[in-house]
Amino acid sequence: MKEHAVLEMKNIHKSFPGVRALQAVDFCLCEGEIHALMGENGAGKSTLIKVITGVYEKDEGEVYLAGHQGPVAIHSPQDAQRLGISTVYQEITLCPNLSVAENMFIGRGQGAGLNWKKMNADTDRILQSLDIPAKAAQQLGSCSLAVQQMIAIARAVDMECKVLILDEPTSSLDEQEVQKLFRLMRDLKQKGVGIIFVTHFLDQVYEVCDKITVLRDGKLVGEYAIKDLPRVQLVAKMLGKEMDDLSDIKGENGSSDASSAENVYEAEGLQSNAGIKPFNFHIRKGEVNGFTGLLGSGRSECVRAIFGADRVLRGKVKKNGKEVKIHKPIDAMKNGIAYLPEDRKRDGIIGDLSVRENIILALQNLKGFFKPFSKAQTYRFAEEYIRLLDIKTASADTPIKSLSGGNQQKVIVARWLLANPDYLILDEPTRGIDVGTKVDIQKLVLKLASEGKSVTFISSETDEMLRTCSRLVVMRDRQVVGELSGEDLTQNKIMSTIAGGEAKS
Amino acid sequence: MSKKKNGGLGDRIRKMSDTNLLLTITIIVFFVMYICAMVFQGAGFLKPQTFCNILNNNAALIISACGMSIVMITGGIDISVGGVAALVSMCCAVHLDYQNGNVFTAVLIALGIGLAFGVIQGLLVAYLDIQPFIVSLAGMFFARGMTTIVNTKPFNVAHEGFKAVKETRIRIPGLGSVNKKGVFVNAYVEIGVVVALLVVLIFFIVLRWTKQGRNFYAVGGSRQSALMLGINVKRTRFYSHLICSILAGIGGFVYFMHVGSGSASHAQGMEMNAIASSIIGGTMLTGGVGNVIGTLFGVLSLSTIQNIVTSAGFDKAWWTGITVAGMLCIFLVIQSVLMSWKKKAMSGGDDNL
Amino acid sequence: MTNTSKKQFQISDLFRSQLMIPVIAILILTIFNLIIGPSFFNIRLDHNNLGNAVLSGNLITILDNGSELAILAIGMTLVTAASGGQDISVGATIAIAGSAILKILCGSDPHPETMQAPIIAAFFVGVIAAMLCGAFNGILVAYFRIQPMVATLILFTAGRSIAAWINNNELPIIKDAEFGYFGGFIPGIAVPTPFLIAVVCVAIIFLVMKFTNLGLYTQSVGINENAARLIGLNPVLIKFLTFVILGVCVAVCGLIKVSRISSINYSVIAKDIEMDAILAVALGGNALSGGKFNMAASILGAYVIQYLTTTLYRMKVPADALPAYKAVVVIVLVVLSAPTVREFFSKMGRKTRSSRREAA
């Protein structure tokens, strides 16, 4: 083991059926350092972290911890906790039915009994010291998501750990809370705790981190000191190609004349029960536009409202100037709207069904309950789109869940293309898929637009949006705060609008 | 607690933990029901013995239902408790009468059967990850089948020592009523009731003040989160099934003490009654919410309504089944509506932040 | 559901096919019975007490008695697939349907000399009653989102009481022989009628599956409700529908059950049949947590259960002890199909294969 290292991992391998998630990855964390783990979605960050925390068992490789002779075995999260590794996950991993205090202390400490009084007092003290607006006796489920996330962080910090892992903890926090978290991280760093920090906000990396390890496609790209790696290079390393390779797609498209076309779809004062402020929206024929904003700013909620995926409370949607009633997804589909959901696994794929069945479902449902396609017809559809989108699958009858993420996404895209919509909403279609497929999807979007379809494209990666969209709706705090097009479509302008644009009335 | 009028009631309900909210509802319903029965039907319900008889008749159910609640809180289900109770009653009966056994070894047999069922079902559910419903369904089949294999015919136990225990009546000082001869008779309870109340007390403490107890809630609330929080989920699920089956064994023995016979048709439908009382007592089948005190009141409510229905002149046998089902239905719908309302109120609250 | 594309035939594919489980079970039972004595499989042409020529023998008994289960398995498979839970009230609702049928046939007199209404009308009322029960369960499950097992617990508790209440707890007896046809034999046809009814039901459901999207939709809803909603399906409606379809199956079973004895015993009729029906679905290799299903395998599973029962009777196992043996079969089956166990076996298989390859 290296000197000062608290955690060292050597030659880690991990594969899942059909995917080699980690291949020969080395990682080293020193005491008193904040170490950013970077990589695109699907690069293997989460897998590596789950190996450290014992959620997954590695196939090969060794993990060393300071103070332990030889490699340590981590088979379960309990083992990890016992060894002084505590973790805050992106999704909240607390129990909503228990009280805040219990969530702080459950699964820890010695003895069989429970001292509620002490637990509540301790919790209140910790909450107060971290400025978290919650009470110890409160049921966790009644706190807002941000507070829940802060409680998860408080729990991890309170555990006297040697290694603290923060896996995208900031996605549901606001600026103030993030600063609070950074103060905390620096405190811990002073005390010699090694911190692994995963985030997709580059600013945050450059603000607090000392070192960066970059992963790509399950392989280690390298470990760098923060001052040796400027942003542009970091992005290039994460993507695996120079920026210029990607930026030339847009040149081909002819969507610039779209601004003169008629509005095909309009939304007025639309509001759903997902907690967004009423918003107006319109899209023209052959136009590609996008919603941008930080995670949780309400991007998805807006498009879900247009599609009727959440319950619409007020407002109306117009198609070609005429008002149409959209209460349920099927209404939207009948009006030529298609929606590719953000969370592929939860809302998109129907895992146990075959690729063929997944492709035909939307069109089949539009056609009607009593008019099933013949089997031969479905095979024809499926094979056509498998070829068209270059979907890598053993056969049309392979269950979709055994495909890789990118190919699953292509199947969902195929599902909606087959339904031949006028307006296609793609919510994070490129999340967690390989770079090649990303480019394919972006090209496809531009091709669709040139064929006269309207597309809304949402992505967390701003440069992707810049490459594909001709107009961007900017959101902050569940509210539309601005709209950018033409000259204004630059990274800086977007950032400044997200950060400080005046709310549009 | 004042009803509805209190402006902050909605707010207070929202702030209450799910467990306490459902528990409060159950207890209120029980008392309202019992007081109504006292007022409108008088006579019988005014005698303390009526209440004690409810306890006497349902001691076994209380014990089994406690076990059921724990399994349900952990997010599982166990429908073998009735079968286990029948098997216990038959085995103990055979042991006492044909093998000249004594009461103590009979108790050991009861515990042993419960333990065996608990270990096997627990292992299958927790470590092989088989659905609890199927595992305990097989357990129920097995227990019922074994009961007839042990002895086909039902029979009454003539064992002297056992009869002495069975006939033991614990008089409650100060509580009672004047009988026809004008003599004040204290109300009594059977030993089983003491056991049942003890079980409720113990598991109330376990669920509230021990780490293992809270682990049940955590696992039931979110298995994934519980794992991440460092709880041994498999072991916790195993324990929940183990406890349930052991309590089913104890419940079986208490049932046996109450009826004094062994039969394959004993404790028929006890599993469903146990589930029903747990639900009425505020345990959610989705897991993570519930309480054994609630379960106790669930059993009491269930049998009180049965008593009310019978004494109100609906003495036809089918009315009991229908009222129990009706009550279950009402509680299920209340739970469902309340939870979705609470969730909605919460997300609305988020909006204002 | 079945793979029609002409791929390279592989034994492992065959083993992975769902139909394998019930087929293997049938094979094992057959071999077992052959060893004990092949007389088990004799089929004779006898005359029953009405003087009709009828087939008899163990195999006919299996086809006869397994019919109700097979019909129920159809509905139960759909409910399981869509809602990921099971309906445990089918036994009790069979009692309700049967009781309703008898009530209509008997009119006011519980022991009428002739039937007071055409059988078809009575059956129609039975179907309505059972569909209402199904709709009740369906509303609780689909709309109120109560787990199916708990929701159906209500009718499970109340069903037999309601059945008794419908006929005022009297025991109606139909003397007309015609009514007995449904649970016995139609004159001139040597095959037991319940089996014929089951065949008709199976044929209907396969036609429905072929000419509608019922199968595709229920599976989609069962596998991923969120995704199903976003492609325009209505999960609430589909779940509700499966419960109503199960209600129709229940009514058919109710008719057969009351016809068998031309009367009804409220507490015994179709007792524990819900457990057997669930078992049939599981034996068919369908996940009880919902999703993909194979209807043929479920129906075959129902007959496997009856086969097992008849075989156990032959071994002189008393009726009351049957469940114990069934339980052992269930446990062996579920343990073998448990993911952890299957993973273990496949790992073992991979190891032996690779070691063999190394040796070669």
Image (spheres, rainbow, N blue to C red):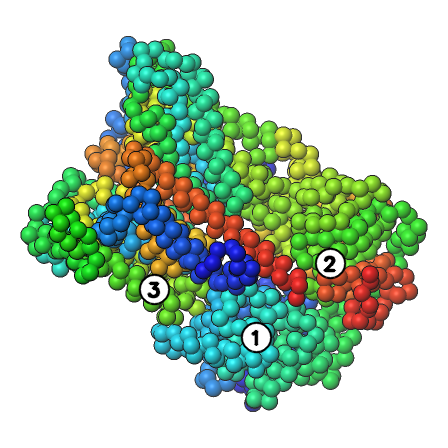
Residue C314's x, y, as percent? 24, 32
On screen, residue A82 versus residue A355, left or right, reads left
Distance from disc 1 to disc 3, alpha carbons, whole Å, reads 31 Å
The disc labelled 3 sits on which kind of residue? Phe
The disc labelled 2 sits on which kind of residue? Lys
Say the numbered circle drawn on residue A277. Answer: 2
Where is mark 3, residue-wise?
Answer: B204
Where is mark 1, residue-wise?
Answer: A153
Front position in the image: C96 or B109? C96
* Mark 3 residue element: helix
Distance from disc 2 to disc 3, alpha carbons, whole Å, reads 46 Å
Q: Residues within 10 Å of mark 2 (few under 14, many from 20)?
A: some
Q: Quadrant of residue C171?
A: top left
Which numbered mark, 1 or 2, is in the foreground of this view?
2
Q: Residues within 10 Å of mark 1 (few under 14, many from 20)?
A: many
What residue is rendered at 66% in x and 38% in y? A365
